[in-house]
Amino acid sequence: MIAISNIQEKIGRFWLNKETKRLKRKVKAFSIEKASTIGVIYNATNRDDSEIVKKFIQYLKEERKDVISLGFIESKDSSDIVKPHLNYTFFDKRNISKAFIPKGNDVESFIKKPFSILIDLNTEACFPIEYISALSSAKFKVGVKGFYHNNVCDLVIDIEENRKLKFLIIQIKHYLKMIKN
């Protein structure tokens, strides 16, 4: 079963590499202050992490930012786990092809939206989130150091000393406030 999954992911990676070669985007660093739209992508499987992300999104809204989030729930049916809210959209394994490529209207519109900043709060390897982050047309992408982020994000933040989501969010706030543009 693991061998089949590996083959399926390799096929997904083949398509991702093909799509990223066609991606044209102009990178521009934004501070939280100057950003108008912010996309937040994260793994919403863990309920505690989801609550941390919701607080972060609330903070961004208080900063008067247009925020759209997309959470991945590693389940075949997320409807019993979460209920969609305004600006909180989710996708689950039903929205993933055999090659682990995420699909659906919410995913497509998130990828195409030209965010000022895309914040990838995923702290582990997760191909569906990697796929969306890599193909996002956001002007500035931020994520944790390691995994796929080093190749996808314009700003990577090292949190080796404390690999907790809360710490990552604190660091993202800190570094995005430092940017002067």
Image (tube, helix red, strand yellow):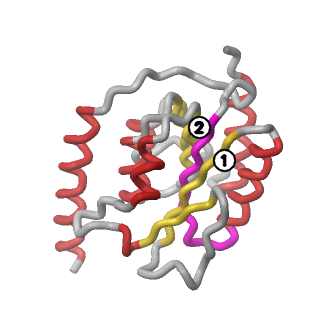
Where residue 119 appears, x then y in whole percent?
58, 43
* Residue 63 located left or right of residue 80: right
The span from disc 1 to disc 2 (Cα, nearest Å) is 8 Å
Q: Residues within 10 Å of mark 2 (few under 14, many from 20)?
A: some
- Amino acid under disc 2: Ile
- Amino acid under disc 1: Leu
The magenta stretch spans which residues?
Answer: 37-48
Is residue 149 depicted above or below 69 in this figure?
A: above
Asked if the residue at tag 2 contacts the one at tag 1, i.e. Cβ–Cβ closer than 8 Å, the answer is yes
Query: Label 2, on which residue?
Result: 157
Query: Label 1, on which residue?
Result: 168
- Residue 103 part of the magenta segment: no
Question: Which residue corresponds to the image point at 68% horizontal and 21% vertical from the top-left?
Answer: 179
Where residue 51 appears, x then y in whole percent?
72, 65
Question: Which residue corresponds to the image point at 18% horizontal and 49% vertical from the top-left?
Answer: 14
Occupied quadrant, residue 9: bottom left
- Residue 41 part of the magenta segment: yes
**Secondary structure type for disc 2:** strand
For the residue pair 176 and 132, the one nearer the viewer reads as 132
Count of number-bearing discs: 2
Question: Which residue corresponds to the image point at 51% horizontal and 78% vertical from the top-left?
Answer: 78
Where residue 129 appears, x then y in whole percent?
43, 55
Quarter of the image for the N terminus: give it: bottom left
Q: Earlier in the sequence, mark 1 or mark 2?
A: 2
Where residue 37 appears, x then y in whole percent?
62, 36
Q: Residue furthest right?
A: 62
Question: Which residue corresponds to the image point at 29% horizontal and 64% vertical from the top-left?
Answer: 100
